[in-house]
Amino acid sequence: MKREEIKEMTVNELKLKLQDDLEELQNLRFQKALHQLENPMRIHHIRKEIAQVKTVIREFELGIRQLEEMS
């Protein structure tokens, strides 16, 4: 997912995305332990995406980022 797409999401959507990404990361780690992981770089990309989502959620909490009104 691109950074611009993450920035356009609402807080609830971000929290759902975070939960999904954490579950995917756990599954990838299990696959790695069992030597069934096809793309090892996927772990890196998921961890990066989790960090980006957490950053945007924190910006909402601090008031740095506001929900933009849709017309």
Image (tube, rainbow, N blue to C red):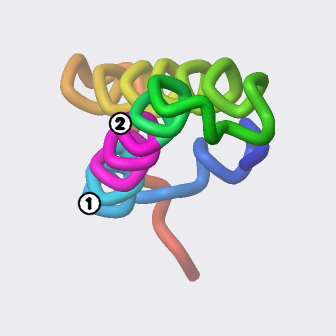
At horizontal 74% and vertical 25% (from top left) the residue drawn is 40
Residue nearest the viewer, comparing 53 with 64 = 53
Provide the secondary structure element on which disc 1 rests: helix
Residue type beneath disc 2: Gln
User: Residue placed at 59% from the left, 54% from the top?
Assistant: 8
**Which of the pair 32/5 is nearer the observer?**
32
What predominant SS class does the magenta segment belong to?
helix
Extreme left residue here? 61
At 29% from the left edge and 21% from the top edge, which residue is drawn? 58
The residue lying at 30 percent from left, 59 percent from top is: 16
Which of disc 1 and disc 2 is earlier in sequence? 1
What is the magenta range? 19-27
Image coordinates of residue 35 in percent, x first then y, are 60, 30
Q: Which residue is mark 2?
A: 26
The three-letter code of the residue at mark 1 reads Asn
Residue 26 lies in the magenta-colored region: yes
